[in-house]
Image (cartoon, rainbow, N blue to C red):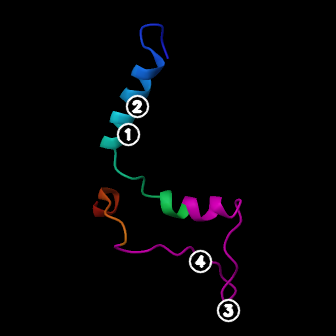
Amino acid sequence: LTKAKTEAEFVALRQERDRSLPMPKLILPALQVNMRGGRLPEPESNGKSFLKIPLNALSCDAWDD
């Protein structure tokens, strides 16, 4: 913030900017791990942990690259 901008002006500017940005590519895997407090999912029967991402569930420019 600067003295030239009010809090409301700053918030409006950031909201407008954020709406124009695509969803970050790693947001879904990051959310899965963060929701578990930084722990990976329980291992599958083969002993490996997997993050599961719903393909084609979200419309996202980040996946179109």
Quadrant position of the C terminus in the picture: bottom left
Q: Tell me which amino acid carries mark 3.
A: Ser
> In the rendering, which numbered label is found on residue 14?
2
Task: Determine contact: label 2, label 1, CB under 8 Å.
Answer: yes
Q: Tell me which amino acid carries mark 4.
A: Phe
Q: Position of residue 62 (x, y in %)?
A: 34, 57
Please tell me which of labels 3 and 1 falls first in the chain. 1
Task: Determine contact: label 3, label 2, CB under 8 Å.
Answer: no
Above or below: residue 45 compared with residue 52: below
Check disc 4: other Cα within 10 Å, few if <14, some if 14-19, many if 20+: few
Q: CA distance from mark 2 to mark 1?
A: 6 Å
Highlighted magenta segment, given as a residue range: 30-56
Q: Tell me which amino acid carries mark 2.
A: Arg
Mark 3 vs mark 2, foreground winner is 2
Mark 3 vs mark 1, foreground winner is 1
Q: CA distance from mark 3 to mark 1?
A: 41 Å
> In the rendering, which numbered label is found on residue 18?
1
Which residue is rendered at x = 56% and y = 73% of the image? 51
- Quarter-wise, where is residue 40 in the image? bottom right
26 displayed left or right of 46? left
Q: Secondary structure at mark 4?
A: loop
Check disc 1: other Cα within 10 Å, few if <14, some if 14-19, many if 20+: few
> In the rendering, which numbered label is found on residue 45?
3
Above or below: residue 54 compared with residue 5: below
Mark 2 vs mark 4, foreground winner is 2
**Residue under numbered circle 4:** 50
Q: Position of residue 20 (x, y in %)?
A: 30, 42
Q: Position of residue 18 (x, y in %)?
A: 38, 39
Please tell me which of labels 3 and 2 falls first in the chain. 2
Q: CA distance from mark 4 to mark 3?
A: 11 Å
